[in-house]
Image (cartoon, grey):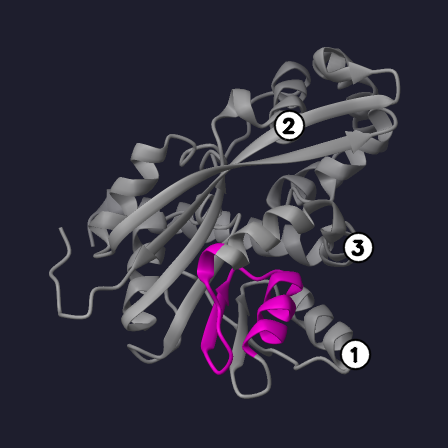
Amino acid sequence: MSAVPQQRAAADARIAGIERAGYNLIAARYADAAHTRTAAGDALLDAAQLRSGQCVLDVASGPGTLTAEAARRVGPAGLAVAADLADASLALCLARTRATNDPAPACVAADAQHLPFRVSSFDRVLCGLGLMFFPDAAAAAAQMFDVLRPGGSAALSVWGEAHEVPLVACALACLRRRLPPPRLGRPSVFRFGDPAVLQATLTAAGFADVRIERFVLESRFPDAAAYWQGFLDLAGGAAWSLARLPEETRAGLATAVQEDLAPYRRAQGYVMDNTLRIARARRPDSPRLRR
């Protein structure tokens, strides 16, 4: 392997490690805040068209909120599998589902770019707000294609473009104003906001009949502090990086973000609409070469 691919592989491994550490750090809060994203999760599950008895894989499952609902939809005759790099998130998924009478998903520690499942194992693959975090998103999309049975389909959600997602963009704008550029550049969370980019990625992986719809998620916060905590509760690797800063610096960020939130100020606090792209794509019944 030449120097450049080696460097890229090392950088990708560091990015994955940061994301794993971040989602382990915020696992409980991410799960506790899941109710604020229920509408988006339901829209993704509806797009997947789950049926009783199906086998479903949830890639980048986190603490398994989406997986647990998928397990309920496929019922005891089906199987839902949560796959994630963050072991603390998976442990939380197991603990919370065991406390209910609902069908429990299986949990597997897995890198989305190297899924440890046999080819053609699943009827459906889900990936909620995950694809943009994978260093090699093309490889992850190809892996999702491979583990689907012919005729099966994947349903994915990603954030829209930066100006469409103030829930994330306001915090990132504040970080750019107040902090030096990070030493390690991570993939943009908005890199699939353009539907054409998402379509091209899925098509290149071999998917057919790619359909992408816009979904709007409303977020409400009583004050800037609540917004900042809400951002940290879903920020993954960014949350881990910020946790390493001095307490004074972190407090300053939580205050400074009010400047970026100003356009969303309402009498009851801050209200913002956030765009997601929800894609559904099918693995063809017959073999097809990837582009």
Q: Is residue 209 left or right of residue 198?
A: left
Tag 3 secondary structure: helix
Look at mark 1 in the image and give the residue it sits on. 100
Percent position of residue 248, x then y: 85, 26
Tag 1 secondary structure: loop
Which numbered tag is attached to residue 32? 3
**Residue that appears at 78% across and 52% down:** 29
Kindly report the distance in space between the C-alpha atoms of the residues bearing marks 1 and 2.
33 Å
Please, is residue 132 above or below residue 179 in the view? below
Residue 46 counted in the magenta span: no
Kindly report the distance in space between the C-alpha atoms of the residues bearing marks 2 and 3.
21 Å
The residues colored magenta run: 47-74
**Residue that appears at 64% across and 27% down:** 273
Residue 65 counted in the magenta span: yes
Q: Is residue 125 left or right of residue 44?
A: left
Comes first in the chain, label 2 or label 3:
3
Give, as a three-letter code, the residue at label 3. Answer: Asp
Look at mark 2 in the image and give the residue it sits on. 273
**Residue that appears at 75% across and 11% down:** 262
As rendered, which of 188 and 21 lies closer to the eye? 188
Percent position of residue 58, x then y: 51, 65
Percent position of residue 139, x then y: 31, 55
Residue 98 placement: quadrant: bottom right
